[in-house]
Image (cartoon, rainbow, N blue to C red):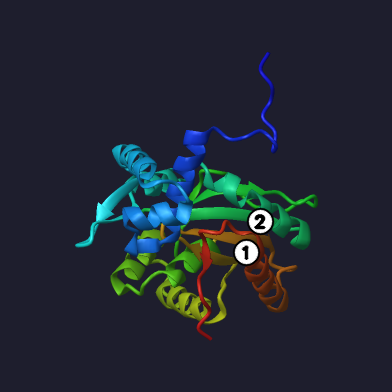
Amino acid sequence: METEATSDTPPVTSLDRALLVLETVAAAGPEGLPLGEIAARTGINKGSVHRLLRGLAHRDYVTRDGEDRNYVLGEALRRMVRTFGAGDNLPLLFRPLLLELSRRTEELVHLGVLDGRRVVYLDKIEPERSVRVWSRVGRRAHIATTALGRALVASAPQSDALMTSYVEEADPDHTQSTLDRRFRDAVAAARALGWAIENQENESGIACVGIALTSTTSQDVAISVTGPAERMTPERLAEIGALLRELAAELAPEEYTLAPATG
């Protein structure tokens, strides 16, 4: 009869050793380690370490790099991280943060990413009290008129051409003469404050505040809190913006970093 593994169950020796070798190579960073040093740090003899490294290299988990040919992490682990951080998994990764934001603010919370020249909603958390906002997961909204989009633009390197294209997307018929200036001012304010604000520009009677989180291994994301404009006063928008940053620093996945506030 098979028994369920417990914390006291000895690990499979070959697998445990391979993981120990992999963790040792990862801890060494981009400089990597030579075979002998890996053996010394793991306490595994050189012959066994060499066999384990050959197996890991075959699956592209490690590779030899540089003039000294040290062992460094291979592309396989990076692919795994990128896959896990892809759009389908982002709602799962950010769900604890979204739930806590909704609980603390009692407002609607959205998670979004850039999708071409629009921002797409990946997840939403409804508060217990009703908030009449037209939004759904999968909806694509204009970058220039949403707190999500403005926060993401503010976290990225400045590009005048991209900002112009976002305004064109939101107002192709040029009926909103002040949109370009409002968008640029909002992005500049977001860079200074660390959060972006949109007040009745995407939907009448509705105001939002949002932040962006960046990653070197996955898509950058934005999170916003949305509520009726009468409730979302300038003071409350600032209060929620600060709360967004506070909770994101505590609860966001560790590979994500808050976009810095320059002001």
At label 1, the amino acid type is Ala
For this rendering, which residue is in front, 27 or 211? 27
Residue in view at x 73 percent, y 68 percent? 230
Q: Say which residue label 1 marks.
A: 248
Q: Residue furthest right?
A: 129
Q: Would you place residue 111 above or below residue 161 in this image?
A: above
For this rendering, which residue is in front, 19 or 143? 19
The numbered disc on residue 12 is: none
Q: Residues within 10 Å of mark 2 (few under 14, many from 20)?
A: many
Residue in view at x 69 percent, y 55 percent? 108
- Disc 2 vs disc 1: Cβ atoms closer than 8 Å? yes
Query: Residue 253, how many percent across, how many down?
Result: 57, 56
Q: Residue furthest top?
A: 1
- The part of the image, by quadrant, that contains residue 175 is bottom left
- The part of the image, by quadrant, that contains residue 223 is bottom right
For this rendering, which residue is in front, 148 or 256? 256
At label 2, the amino acid type is Leu
Query: Residue 72, how many percent across, how many down?
Result: 33, 55
Q: Say which residue label 2 marks.
A: 97
The answer to whether residue 11 is left or right of residue 215 is: right
